Image (cartoon, coloured by chain):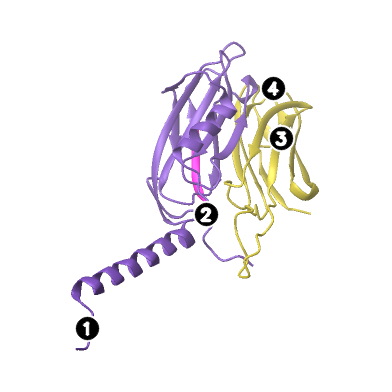
């Protein structure tokens, strides 16, 4: 299981723009590298990252091999209501990881 | 009388060998690389045939980076991010990576602010292009040049 780091403020004012930082451990093997014997190392990357806020998608990213290992993504969203943010990453070879973060809005 | 190699013959042979070596070097060193034309084609595939105008987008890249394996990249778009007027997507492309596509971010009015950041890989010193798609369908771009000292993708595999 991949380990992910999520940075979301625990509390926010209604209507405030919050910055979210996410980092997940993943090799992001490009599929362009070769071993010393010349065999191509098969591609193994995260293809998709989605963030939902109480079930509504607020941010989505499609990643390609040019994203550095351990993908780090920063984006923002408006704090509209208390609830949970769900982050999910999916990729090659059935890779899938999900993390959640709670936010209380006053 | 013993025939000695003339200066002309010597130069011809030496030149031929040098050219052969040069050609060999080009073939073995040159890895699979995208070209600016391929980047333009990739851009067309993602955003369609609409006109892309420079402006509104700011692509933040360091001008020089030592390690091309993790280059910080920030894209900011001037937009009020309201329901009526917002950024729909931000796409990033490179000129000389093996594959021109880098990343596509899909945002909406719920983002609040049109600013996204990540870390990318760069295989060479080159231009990076960010294109944003606004809710009215218009396309805006920004280009940044970067010098890479240690290219990504060159290190030995496992």
Asked if the residue under mark 1 is in contact with the one under mark 3, i.e. CB atoms within 8 Å, the reply is no
Q: Which mark is residue A80?
A: 4
Chain letter of the residue beneath label 2 in the structure image: B
Q: Chain of mark 1?
A: B
Q: Which mark is residue B69?
A: 2
Which is more foreground, mark 3 or mark 1? 1
Cα–Cα gap, marks 4 and 2: 37 Å
Q: Which residue was labeled with disc 3?
A: A50
In the rendering, which numbered label is found on residue B4? 1
Q: Which chain is purple?
A: B
Task: Give A34 or B116, whichever is nearer the viewer.
Answer: A34
Q: Are marks 4 and 3 in contact (CB under 8 Å)?
A: no
Q: CA distance from mark 4 to mark 1?
A: 91 Å
Describe the element under mark 3 as helix, strand or loop. Answer: strand
Q: Which residues are magenta?
A: B70-75
Under circle 1, the secondary element is loop
Q: Left or right? Give the position of B8 relative to B26.
A: left
């Amino acid at each position: 299981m991949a380990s992910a780091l999520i940075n979301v403020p625990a509390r926010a004012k209604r209507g405030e723009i919050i910055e979210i930082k996410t980092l997940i451990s993943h090799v992001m093997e490009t599929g362009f590298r070769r071993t010393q014997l010349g065999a191509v190392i098969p591609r193994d990357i995260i293809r998709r990252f989605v963030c939902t806020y109480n079930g509504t998608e607020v941010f989505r990213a499609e990643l390609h091999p040019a994203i550095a290992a351990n993908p780090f993504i920063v984006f923002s969203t408006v704090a509209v209501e208390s609830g949970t943010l769900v982050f999910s990453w999916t990729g090659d070879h059935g890779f899938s990881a999900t993390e959640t973060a709670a936010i209380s809005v006053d | 009388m013993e025939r000695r190699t003339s200066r002309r013959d010597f130069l011809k042979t030496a030149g031929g060998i040098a050219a052969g070596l040069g050609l060999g070097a080009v073939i073995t060193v040159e890895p699979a690389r995208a070209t600016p034309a391929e980047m333009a084609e990739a851009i067309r595939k993602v955003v369609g045939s609409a006109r892309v105008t420079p402006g509104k987008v700011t692509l933040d890249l360091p001008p020089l980076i030592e390690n091309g394996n993790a280059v910080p990249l920030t894209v900011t778009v001037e937009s009020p991010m309201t329901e009526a007027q917002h950024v729909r997507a931000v796409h990033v492309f490179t000129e000389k990576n093996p594959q021109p596509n880098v990343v596509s971010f899909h945002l909406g009015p719920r983002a609040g602010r049109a600013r996204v950041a990540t870390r990318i890989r760069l295989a060479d010193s080159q231009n990076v292009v960010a294109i944003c798609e606004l809710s009215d369908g218009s396309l805006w771009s920004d280009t940044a040049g970067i010098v890479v000292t240690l290219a990504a993708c060159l290190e030995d595999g496992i």
